[in-house]
Image (cartoon, coloured by chain):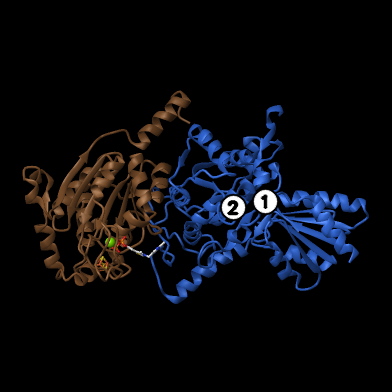
Chain colours: A blue, B brown
Amino acid sequence: MADRLRLMQGNEACALAAAMAGVRFFAGYPITPSTEIAEQMSEMLPKLGGKFIQMEDEIASMAAIVGASLAGMKSMTATSGPGFSLKQENIGFATFTEVPCVVVNVQRTGPSTGLPTNTAQGDMMQAKYGSHGDIPAIALYPSTVPEIFDMTIKAINISEMLRQPVILLMDEIIAHMREKILVPTQEEVDKMLVSRPKPAKGIDKYLPYDASMSDVPPLAAYGEGYRFHVTGLYHDATGFPTSKPAEVDAKIRRIHRKVNNVVDDITFLRYDQMDDAEYAIVSCGSTARSARRAVVLAREKGIKVGSLQLKTIWPFPEAKVSEVCSKVKKVIVPEMNMGQMVHEVERVAKGRCKVVPYNRVDGEPLTPEEILETLAKEVAW
Amino acid sequence: MAEAWDFLRTDKMPHIWCPGCGHGVMMNALLRTMAKLDVNKDDICVVSGIGCASRLPGYLDFNTLHTTHGRALAFATGIKLANPRLKVIVVSGDGDATAIGGNHLIHAARRNMDITLICMNNNIYGMTNGQYSPMTPTSMLATTAPYGNLERNFDLCKLVEGCGANYVARATAAHPRNISQYIEYALTHKGFQFVEVMTQCPTYYGRRNKLGGPVEMINSLKQNTILNTAAAKLPPEKLEGKIQIGEFVKKEELTYLDRFDAMVDRITGGVKP
Ligand SMILES: Cc1ncc(C[n+]2csc(CCOP(=O)(O)OP(=O)(O)O)c2C)c(N)n1
Ligand code: SF4
Ligand SMILES: [Mg+2]
């Protein structure tokens, strides 16, 4: 117990959770503020029967984890903004070919090289729209070290369950901060784990994209005797190229449907003092920490405000945010960007409440006091 | 005894290649080698990028992966490391391997990663209708070099040798036996194994440069090449304009996986995780 109660860095918690959840392949390219994840994996994996490799760039890292996953290993990579941009083509490939893997993006101040390496939340939209074509994105975003541990496992599970990449967003603050965490035992972690659907033993013909039984077709591994084909071209149930309009339409709709089908299961939220709230703060990541503190400060002044932390960013938790918007007078959306998630909140609010953006974009943490000040102005107005 | 035919996905025919395309000669030689080695299909994984050459894996009855342009070696690296039992072969075009994929090529070779790379070099971007590639010789015409190519091309075998590969060889579509022989060596040895196969693209490279049809192009591949062992006996002036084929590097240096396994033994004291 004593050695399970630890003071741990966010990146370290992410790496440890991944290793405990069975990730056995990690490919990466150094970039602050994500590098500690690669460093930890390089130390742990060879001792666990896994493999770590530092590739020549982020494009190659993304490619390598997809290859390793197709060969049957749970796989992960970690990066930050510039590297996240480079990974996009192969994230699209993995989504379209339905290969499970986890991509951690520890956000730093952009655009471009930006402010290495201050904090930011500038990649919220890139996590959804970064790759070309129409891909169904899944992105999770913790706000504390224990949450990082937990959400890393959830990201791995969701990717396995749905056969698709999951983005784990972080920001420099939570990745580099140290907090108390009670690390679960391996047995406890094992109980949480989900594995990818596998083809039934002894089948004659394995079809890697046969969705007749489920929107998530079983995934064999290379070398298991099925000799299947995977391509980034539109493909039919057999995995081979097709350009038949009906099959093209069915494929793209199915990969979106498989995510939409489980929205409730993959939506993670945290509510603080929302029961009687007249005002709400909707936020994520390190900003949600400031939001929770702002709630405490505002309540001391008698303002009935609560906080909704989005731990699932994509698919956007429309129903739950909508519920909040129907109950409160105003929603404050503090973000360390020029305003990204605020558009989603506005979209679901449908004019039922006022949606107020607050944006900090100087690379410094967004503080509780700023949120409180914004809130106080709105209350007085 | 297996035959080349046995390794084809015949239901995926006809293939997409133009009549007279040289890529098919390479595929034929590859499959004959597979038959000769009597490989277990389940243990072979063939990976490609994007291009005419890269459509090849779809026709082969192995574990096959058609990835993104230039990235095949990086995907293949992940596959090989995750399952070292698999024999991993990458097939690529010249643009795929040397332009967009050039960085992955030099690093896979530098690591001496246990992968066989067969690059089908037709000196052009075939699939996108004939733009110049890093393998288009200077002055030759392409749709994006209408006044002649200003750039110099790689000597690809020298490049890969310089990067540290264990095996480097070159053959052409006019020398199918050499292709088979070199691929056989590559498939039965460890580390980075590289075979460049010069192929003809009559549709774009040949037509634009008035090199004739497939027959004329094959003939010129025959006439303009010389075996490196024969070349070694000739004075330089006799080698002008000739491309050397043959085996250029044959080493058995430690591979990435050799080093990885040794490291695991060292840090675990030999107790397999
Ligand atoms: C990222 C990206 N850039 C460009 C392309 C377009 N493209 C497809 S194939 C190709 C060139 C292929 O040439 P090569 O590798 O020599 O193969 P060949 O067709 O000659 O066999 C290009 C540029 C692409 N598919 N993806
Ligand atoms: S365009 Fe050239 S490389 Fe492509 S199939 Fe035709 S002949 Fe072969
Ligand atoms: Mg080419």
User: Residue tagged by mark 1?
Assistant: A363
Subunit of label 2? A
Q: Earlier in the sequence, mark 1 or mark 2?
A: 2
Image quadrant, ligand 1: bottom left
Query: In what quadrant of the picture does the C terminus of chain A appear?
Result: bottom right
User: Cβ of disc 2 within 8 Å of ligand 1?
Assistant: no
- Residue A320 placement, left or right of B44: right
Secondary element under disc 2, as helix, strand or loop, is loop
Is B268 in front, or is B213?
A: B213
Rendered location of residue B42, percent (x, y)? 34, 49
Q: Which residue ends up furthest to the top in the rendered image?
A: B269
Task: Give the residue type at disc 1.
Answer: Gly
Check whether the beta carbons of the residues at disc 1 and disc 2 lie within 8 A of each other. yes
Dividing the picture into quarters, in which one does residue B225 lie?
A: bottom left
Rendered location of residue A181, percent (x, y)? 71, 37
Query: In what quadrant of the picture does the N terminus of chain A appear?
Result: top right
Q: Does residue B223 appear in the picture of this structure?
A: yes
Task: Give the residue type at disc 2.
Answer: Gly
Is B259 in front, or is A214?
A: B259
Residue located at (85% from left, 54% from top): A273
- Residue B227 placement, left or right of B9: left
User: Residue tagged by mark 2?
Assistant: A114
Please say if A46 is above or below A334. above
